[in-house]
Image (tube, rainbow, N blue to C red):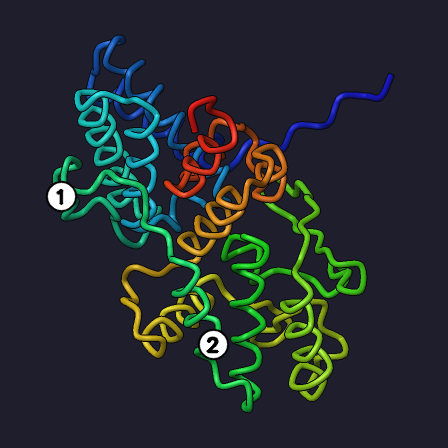
Amino acid sequence: MDPSPTPPPPSEFFLRDLPLFLDHLSVEKGLAENSLEAYRRDLTAFGRYLDEEGLSASEVGKEDLVRWFGLRRSGGASPRSIARATSALRGLYRFLFAEKRIRADPTSGLENPRRWMTLPKLLSREDVDRLLEAPDVETPKGLRNKAMLELLYACGVRATELATLRLGSLHLADGFLIVKGKGSKERVVPVADSSARWVARWIAGPRAARRGAASSPWLFPGIGARPLTRQTVFLVLKAAARKAGLDPEAVSPHVLRHSFATHLVDGEADLRAVQMMLGHASIATTEIYTHVSRARVRRVYDRSHPRA
């Protein structure tokens, strides 16, 4: 019998941030045991979400909080549960900020959850096409940005996964990538031929001409021997959105990832396959993140119902 897979190591959130905050609530605030347990449950769920998305507590922005609350609401959480979780997160981040463990508090100015606890809107296929056509591929930087955007949408990778993608993880001739996610878990993700051609063009052209590129393991080298930062991926995407005439505030790496999954489901892709490509530990997460379009519902109805 094959040995069971080794679980990923506990993240910094579970090793440091959450225990410190719970100790603070128990010892310094004297919180009752029932209240303490409620905080623990809500923040444990939030920590699992961070692990799923490959984020640390210090990297979280308001959009990540909005997304998490949207997931909880879509998963059936009551308004009372949402309000309690909001309080727990505010308390956590105020504590981490006061302890100088984070530079900014993402819950500062957080609005009433009822006003924004919906899943992020996805892009239509037409908007994705406009976005992917935005970079000027006649320039080295534009060609790099084109390759980045193609992989974000074609493979549904997270911003950090894209930024730290290694050349050795590319198998373009065979049509797939090996993506290393949270906990160093690897997954195989197919890549479309058209996207693979843009990546190959970047590698053979501007990347090969870049100083020190031959010794760099990264597909998208940053400064020195480091890969690009997650923030650079966001900036590239926002700039492309503006050029494409889209609202840059409505476009993020996660929105492209969400669009990737939704468009696959719209095309009747198997949900388990989508789960594997996204790197979700639970199929429930995939079910929440993928909308079933009206067109797909109609196709299923026409194919299945005796009166159709």
Q: Nearer the viewer, mark 2 or mark 1?
A: 2
Asked which secondary structure carries label 1, the reply is loop
Which residue does the numbered mark 2 point to in the structure image? 133
Picture coordinates of residue 203, whole percent (x, y) = 70, 77
Q: Residues within 10 Å of mark 1 (few under 14, many from 20)?
A: few
Q: Is residue 110 visible?
A: yes
Picture coordinates of residue 301, whole percent (x, y) = 44, 30
- Rounded to the nearest whole Å, what is the CA distance between mark 2 and mark 1? 35 Å
Front residue of this view, candidates 93 and 231: 231
* Residue at 38%, 57% in the rendered image: 123
* Residue at 56%, 43% in the rendered image: 278
Q: Residues within 10 Å of mark 2 (few under 14, many from 20)?
A: some
Q: Residue furthest front?
A: 307
Q: Is residue 48 visible?
A: no
* Residue at 40%, 35% in the rendered image: 17
Amino acid tagged 2: Glu
Which residue does the numbered mark 1 point to in the structure image? 111
Does label 2 or label 1 sit earlier along the sequence?
1
Q: Is residue 140 above or below residue 289?
A: below
Left or right: 19 in relation to 182: left
In which quadrant will I find the C terminus? top left
Is there a contact, CB below 8 Å, between mark 2 and mark 1?
no
Front residue of this view, candidates 180 and 189: 189
Q: Is residue 195 above or below residue 96?
A: below
* Residue at 29%, 59% in the rendered image: 250
Q: Is residue 210 above or below residue 266?
A: below
In which quadrant will I find the N terminus? top right
Left or right: 245 in relation to 272: left
Amino acid tagged 1: Glu
Asked where in the image residue 92 lies, by quadrant, the reply is top left
Asked which secondary structure carries label 2, the reply is loop
